[in-house]
Image (cartoon, grey):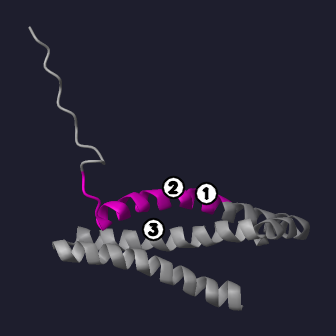
Amino acid sequence: MAVRPRPLSPHLQIYRWTITMAMSILHRATGIALYIGTLLLVIWLAAAAIGVEALDGVNGLYGNWFGQLVLFGYTWALFHHMLGGLRHFLWDNIIGMEPGEREKLAWVNLVGSIVLTLLVWTIFVWVG
């Protein structure tokens, strides 16, 4: 008896990348990033509860260029994940399920998260 090779499952090199596919992956990645960002928030709150010296140390760490970059990314991840959740809420209610509407909502998710992040950082960090 000849052994027949098993068929291979489709993989990423076969699929045509779509914006909804990329947003699905980003939604999962931002969910993971929010765990780390929330830990940073807990560290900041704990330092505030401990005292002024601890809070100054954490503020110094978060205030340098790398800390600001991480906090900027956390802000973007927060908005991206939130808008992705709203997009899924719409889909759960069978809103925006047509082919053109799905892609439009995915682009709104991406662009909206960038705009909201820049807006928050402009108002509260860079100007304030």
Tag 3 residue: 81
**Quarter of the rendering occupied by the C terminus:** bottom right
Amino acid type indicated by mark 2: Ile
Which of marks 2 and 3 precedes in the sequence?
A: 2
Residue 101 screen position, x and y as percent: 22, 77
Mark 2, secondary structure of its residue = helix
The extreme right residue here reads 53
* Residue depicted at x 28% and y 78%: 104
- Left or right placement of residue 85 versus residue 18 in this view: right
Query: In this view of the protein, which residue sits in the foreground, 67 or 48?
Result: 67
Measured from the top left, where is residue 97 in percent x and y? 19, 72
Using the numbered discs, state the Cα–Cα distance from disc 1 to disc 3 in whole angstroms: 14 Å
Query: What mark, if any, has residue 32 been given in the picture?
Result: 2
Element under disc 3: helix
Quote the CA–CA distance across marks 3 and 2.
Answer: 10 Å
Q: Amino acid at mark 1?
A: Ile
Give the image quarter of residue 59. Answer: bottom right
Residue 34 drawn in magenta = yes
Observer-nearest of 28 and 47: 28
In the image, the segment drawn in magenta is 15-39
Q: Quadrant of residue 106?
A: bottom left
Can residue 95 be seen here? The reply is no
**10 with respect to 53 (left or right):** left
Q: In terms of sequence position, does the residue under pointer 1 or pointer 3 come before the other?
A: 1
- Mark 1 lies on residue: 36
